[in-house]
C-alpha cells in the first residue's frame, strides 16, 4: 500500500489488508467475503485513493481475521489484481495474491435463468470457466452463457 | 470423445469419419441389410421435451443395429413430476443403459448429465443451447448434395436466437471454411457467444434482415421455425411470426444446385410449392438422421464398424 493510502487509516495489529481493489469495488469485495453483515469484525475502508498501478483504488483492512486463500480467490471476479497482506503483530507476516484459475467452482451461480444449475436442488458444483483473464470473460461450464461480471455479485454462493 | 454435448467435442477428422460411417449405414437404415453390431447394447432415450424425428430416429438407429431402447416416456408419468433432480434420474440411467440420449428444456442439461454419469451422453437438444446430432445429419446432407463441406456459401434463416440447430451448425460449417449469412429479425439474432467465437476464429459472417438479397450466390439455405414455445410472451412472438416465408417463385434466380434445408417441423416458413422443386432437401435430410445417429452410436459405444461389417 502506498504511504498516502496508509496514512488514511491506522495500522492494524492482526488481520488482513487487501490492497489494489479497483476504485468503487470495495463494498462488493466485502459482500463476496461475507463481511457486509458482520457486526463483530472491525473493518476499515479506504475508497478512491490515488494509485500508481490503478489510477484510483480501494483498500480494505479486516482486523483479527486471516482470510484463507480460498476466500481470497473469490475476489478474482472483481479484484483480480488485488494484493493481500496477512498482518501479525503489526508486521506483514505473509503476502498473497488473488489467483484467477481456469475455472471458478462454487463461487457464483450462472446468471442465466434457464440454465440447468438454476434448479437449487441439483447437486453438482456451479462452474464458471475463465475464457479470458483480461478482459475477464467467464462462461457457465454447463450452458455456455457469457456472464455479466458486474452482475455476478448478485449470484454469489 | 466420450460424450457429444456440442460440436466442439468433435474434431473435423472425427466429423468426416462419422459421416463416412453413416454412408456405409445407408443400406441398413433402409432395411436392405441387417447388421446387428449393437446387439446387447441398451440406449436410454430421455426426452423431457417433445420430439418426433430425433427421438424416433435414435430409436430406429439403435434397433436397425440390433440394440434395444428404453424410453423415459411421458415426463408427466415419471418421477420428474415428484421433483426428482436430473442428477438422480441420470444415476439410474448409469445402471440401466449403455448410452443415454437427452433432450431437456434447460440449457446445459446435457453437459450436466454427462458430468453426472459414467456412460456416454448425447445431447439431443438442451433448451436454446445446442443440437449436435442434428448438425451431423445436416453436414451429411450437405456433403451428399454438394460433394463437399468446404468453402460453401450458407444462409441460416429465421430464429437464430433460440434455434439450437443453427447454434451447432454455424460453428461446424465455419470450421470447414463456409461463409455464413445470418438472416433474422434483430430480436432473434444469433447469440453473442456464438458470433464472438466465430469472429474470433476469423470466420466471414454477414448479419442481415434482408431475406432474399443474396439468394443467387448461395449454396445452402437453412430455414428454421420461429419457435413460439421459446418466447417469454406471445406478443413478442406475434411481432416476428411469419416474417420469412420461402416460396417457389423466390427461387428463380437461385443456383441450380442450391439446396434448401430445414430441421423440421416447419410451420409456414417454407411454402408447400417448394417441396416439388429440386432444391427441397428437408425430407431427405430427416431420413439421414437415422444413419448419422447410427454412426455416432457406433462411435461412442466403441464398435469397430469396418471390422463388424466385413
Image (cartoon, helix red, strand yellow):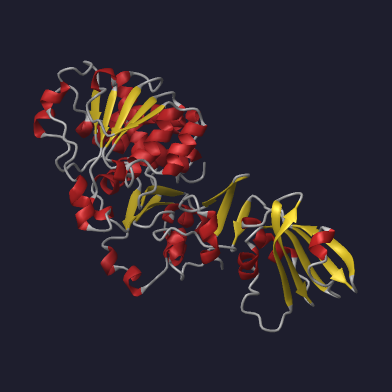
- Residue A43, relative to residue A55: is it above or below? below
Q: Residue A39: in sight, yes or no?
A: yes
Q: Which residue lies furthest to the bottom in this view?
A: A40
Label total for image: 0
- Residue B130, relative to residue A78: is it above or below? above
Tell me which residue sits at (45%, 67%) in the image: B88
Quarter of the picture containing the C terminus of chain B is: top left
Image x and y of residue B24, in percent: 36, 27
Image x and y of residue B80, in percent: 34, 68
Residue in the foreground of this view, choosing between B51 and B189: B189
Tell me which residue sits at (32%, 41%) in the image: B160
Give the quadrant of residue B169.
Answer: top left
Q: Residue B34: in sight, yes or no?
A: no
Tell me which residue sits at (78%, 76%) in the image: A63
Residue in the foreground of this view, choosing between B267 and B286: B267
Image x and y of residue B8, in percent: 49, 39
Residue in the foreground of this view, choosing between A135 and B176: A135
- Residue A92, relative to residue B303: is it above or below? below
Tell me which residue sits at (61%, 79%) in the image: A37
Q: Is residue B148 left or right of residue B51?
A: right
Give the quadrant of residue B264.
Answer: top left
Image x and y of residue A47, in percent: 68, 64
Amino acid at each position: 500500500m502506498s504511504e498516502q493510502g496508509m496514512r488514511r487509516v491506522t495500522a492494524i495489529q492482526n488481520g488482513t489488508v487487501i490492497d489494489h481493489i479497483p476504485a468503487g469495488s470495495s463494498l462488493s469485495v466485502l459482500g463476496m467475503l461475507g463481511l457486509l453483515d458482520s457486526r463483530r469484525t472491525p473493518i476499515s475502508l479506504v475508497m478512491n485513493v490515488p494509485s500508481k498501478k490503478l489510477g484510483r483504488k480501494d483498500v480494505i483492512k479486516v482486523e483479527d481475521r486471516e482470510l484463507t486463500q480460498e476466500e481470497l480467490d473469490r475476489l478474482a471476479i472483481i479484484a483480480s489484481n488485488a494484493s493481500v497482506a496477512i498482518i501479525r503483530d503489526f508486521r506483514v507476516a505473509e503476502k498473497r495474491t488473488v489467483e484467477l484459475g481456469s475455472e471458478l467452482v462454487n463461487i457464483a451461480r450462472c446468471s442465466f435463468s434457464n440454465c440447468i444449475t438454476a434448479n437449487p436442488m441439483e447437486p453438482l458444483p456451479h462452474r464458471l470457466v475463465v475464457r479470458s483473464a483480461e478482459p475477464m470473460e467467464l462462461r457457465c461450464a454447463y450452458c455456455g452463457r457469457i456472464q455479466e461480471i458486474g452482475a455476478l455479485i448478485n449470484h454469489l454462493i | 470423445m466420450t460424450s457429444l454435448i456440442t460440436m466442439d467435442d468433435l474434431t473435423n477428422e472425427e466429423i468426416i469419419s462419422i459421416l463416412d460411417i453413416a454412408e456405409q449405414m445407408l443400406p441398413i437404415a433402409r432395411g436392405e441389410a441387417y447388421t446387428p453390431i449393437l446387439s446387447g447394447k441398451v440406449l436410454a432415450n430421455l426426452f423431457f421435451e417433445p420430439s418426433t424425428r430425433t427421438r424416433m430416429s435414435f430409436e430406429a438407429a439403435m434397433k436397425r443395429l440390433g440394440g434395444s431402447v428404453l424410453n423415459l416416456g411421458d415426463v408427466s408419468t415419471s418421477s420428474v413430476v415428484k421433483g426428482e433432480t436430473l442428477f438422480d434420474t441420470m444415476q439410474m440411467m448409469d445402471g440401466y443403459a449403455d448410452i443415454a440420449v437427452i433432450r431437456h428444456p434447460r440449457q446445459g442439461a446435457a453437459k450436466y448429465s454427462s458430468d453426472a454419469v459414467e456412460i456416454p451422453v448425447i445431447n439431443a437438444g438442451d433448451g436454446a443451447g445446442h443440437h449436435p446430432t442434428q448438425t451431423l445429419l445436416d453436414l451429411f446432407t450437405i456433403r451428399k448434395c454438394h460433394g463437399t463441406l468446404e468453402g460453401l456459401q450458407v444462409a441460416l434463416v429465421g430464429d437464430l436466437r433460440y434455434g439450437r440447430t443453427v447454434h451447432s451448425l454455424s460453428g461446424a460449417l465455419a470450421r470447414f471454411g463456409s461463409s455464413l449469412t445470418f438472416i433474422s429479425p434483430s430480436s432473434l439474432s444469433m447469440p453473442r457467444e456464438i458470433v464472438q467465437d466465430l469472429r474470433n476464429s476469423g470466420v466471414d459472417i454477414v448479419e442481415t434482415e434482408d431475406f432474399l438479397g443474396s439468394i443467387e450466390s448461395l449454396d445452402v439455405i437453412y430455414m428454421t421455425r420461429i419457435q413460439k414455445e421459446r418466447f417469454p410472451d406471445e406478443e413478442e412472438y406475434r411481432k416476428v411470426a411469419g416474417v420469412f416465408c420461402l416460396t417457389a417463385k423466390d427461387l428463380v434466380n437461385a443456383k441450380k444446385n442450391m439446396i434448401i434445408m430445414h430441421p423440421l417441423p416447419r410451420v409456414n416458413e417454407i411454402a408447400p410449392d417448394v417441396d416439388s422443386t429440386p432444391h427441397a432437401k428437408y425430407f431427405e435430410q430427416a431420413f439421414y438422421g437415422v444413419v448419422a445417429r447410427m454412426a455416432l452410436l457406433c462411435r461412442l459405444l466403441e464398435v469397430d464398424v469396418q471390422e463388424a461389417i466385413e
